[in-house]
Image (tube, rainbow, N blue to C red):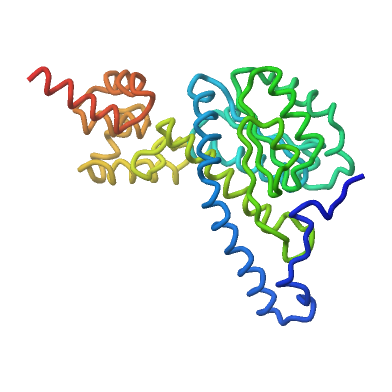
Amino acid sequence: MIDLNLLDTEGVNENSRNIDNKSTLEVLETINNEDQKVAEVISEILPDIEKAIEAIYEKVRKGGRIIYVGAGTSGRLGVLDASECPPTYGVDPGLIQGIIAGGLKALHSAIEGAEDVKEQAVVDLKEIGLSEKDALVGLAASGRTPYVISALEYANTLGAVTASISCVKNAEVSEPAQYPIEAIVGPEVVTGSTRMKAGTAQKLILNMISTTVMIKLGKVYGNLMVDVKATNQKLKVRAKRIIEMTTDLRGEDAEALFEKSGLSVKTAIVMEKAGLTKEEAEILLDINEGRISRAIENAKKSEELIL
């Protein structure tokens, strides 16, 4: 039997005991006051998040993937974060994947009991070919989801990196996770409704994981998304704008460089800033793991040595 009294996410919030008798504005103020606590909690566990990201990045840098696994709200958040990375950073859809207990149908409809079927987690992970090259992040607000625990245990047997994100102290999912992250946000405004503060905490942490890994992979220059794929007119305009923001070129000149680069913003920037051909810029980017700043810096060092 599950003793809900032991879970931080199931506590009764004293600040919202009489919320059903409050005005609309008072309800909003209560929710907002509680939400503000989430960022403070996460600031206290940044070292734990850092350790997880460093390990995850090493797997991805060597060709591995990030796999999010969860049930209910936690699972949906994982799928959401994974699905937003390809259009944002131009990565392959398979690089970051979200798996939810109950399958795709569970994204919009509750699949009763799916989170309790431990064996299905292994089946789902075998289906995507999880291996020692990958990193698996288990998401469970309550910290006790059997499906997620099973996924973490299986990933460990393969030699994959494992991390967990939960919102309770000494979570069960923390035990099999090599890098456990526990964001103790406290009782929800509506008791047990972990789609609220717990969901917000998980979303923020997932943002940190994927964004930081993408930055370390060279998908960002300054704070610009330089791996944007110009698949429509709006994105072509954005690509040209990024070139204008990072070089001295404007208008038709920026557009011409973009065309000359093979429609690659990163290549265009390195070509212009380092005075290289398209082929030379591509080689330099490849040597420097796709990181523009490092590529330009090394190009300048090479030039100084020649001089």
181 relative to 87 in the view: left or right: right
The image quadrant of residue 281 is top left
Q: Name the residue at 55% across, 34% down.
A: 52
- Residue 140 position, x and y percent, is 73, 43
Above or below, comparing residue 90 to residue 5 in the picture: above
- Residue 97 position, x and y percent, is 64, 32
The image quadrant of residue 143 is top right
- Depth check, front residue: 107 or 165: 165
Q: Name the residue at 55% across, 29% down.
A: 56
Q: Name the residue at 53% across, 28% down.
A: 55
Q: Name the residue at 57% across, 64% down.
A: 36
- Depth check, front residue: 237 or 217: 217
- Depth check, front residue: 265 or 12: 12
Q: How many marks on residues?
A: 0
Quarter in which the C terminus is drawn: top left
- Residue 218 position, x and y percent, is 40, 32
89 relative to 221 in the view: left or right: right
10 relative to 61 in the view: left or right: right
Quarter in which the N terminus is drawn: top right
- Residue 59 position, x and y percent, is 54, 23
Above or below, comparing residue 132 to residue 238 in the picture: above
